[in-house]
Image (cartoon, rainbow, N blue to C red):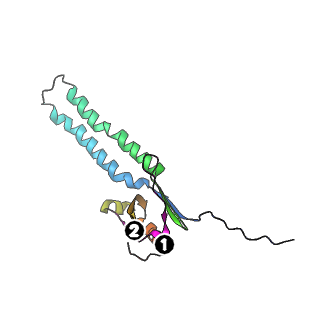
Amino acid sequence: MLAEQPQHDPAMIDREWVGYHPRAAIPAIVFTSALTLSLGVGRWYLDHLSIKPAGLITWFTFALAWGIWPLVTAVFFYRTATHTYRLTDRFLLIDFGPLSRPVRPISLSEVRAVTSGASWIARRLGVGWVEVWTHEAATRLLGVRHPGRFAARIRNASGDSTPS
């Protein structure tokens, strides 16, 4: 019996696979809730306006207050379902979904710097952004859970020692 020759497997090995975390949408949801509440309460203080027909101001504030929610919900579901960031042994594969232009895979040998950060609210929620720099451009990955850890994984995979 002959020993088999080892086969070269061209498949990429996954190191980490992350995406847009639902916690990243909390600031937008809180802001939209505050806007809805303020418009709902504020309409009682606009009763002195003389708009004919009388119910027009009520319908107008209702439409402003609740009309934004379908958009916020659609953005939330779109980002959490489609934004994926896949780190393999050779590439960083980024997908922002079918409504965005395709992002060319970033070879780990092309990575020049990796930074991460977050606003003070996002930092408390444990989410933020990671920015990957190449000679050609910078790509920002939004809504990453533990952005410093993911940036360090990209840095280690690319052999870069740039701090975040």
Q: Position of residue 4 (x, y in %)?
A: 79, 70
Q: Say what secondary structure mark 2 lies in.
A: loop
Q: Is residue 133 left or right of residue 44?
A: right
- The outermost residue toward the top is 53
SS category of the residue bearing label 1: helix
- Quarter-wise, where is residue 43 in the image? top left
Residue 68 image position (x, y, % from top left): 32, 40
Note whether 3 is above or below 59 in the view shown: below
Work out whether mark 1 precedes mark 2 in sequence or the reverse, and give the earlier one. 2
| Numbered label attached to residue 135 | 2
Q: What range of the chain is rendered magenta?
A: 97-118
Q: Which residue corresponds to the image point at 46% horizontal and 46% vertical from the top-left?
A: 98
Crowding near pointer 1: few (<14 within 10 Å), some, many (20+)? many
Give amino acid for label 2: His
Q: Amino acid under label 1?
A: Ser
121 to the left or right of 97: left
At x 40%, y 75%, the residue is: 162
Q: Which residue does the numbered mark 1 point to in the structure image? A: 158
Q: Which mark is residue 128?
A: none
Q: CA distance from mark 1 to mark 2?
A: 14 Å
Residue 101 visible in the displayed image: yes
Q: Residue 109 placed where, x, y %?
A: 49, 71
Q: Quadrant of the N terminus?
A: bottom right
Q: Residue furthest front?
A: 136
The nearer-to-camera label among 1 and 2 is 2
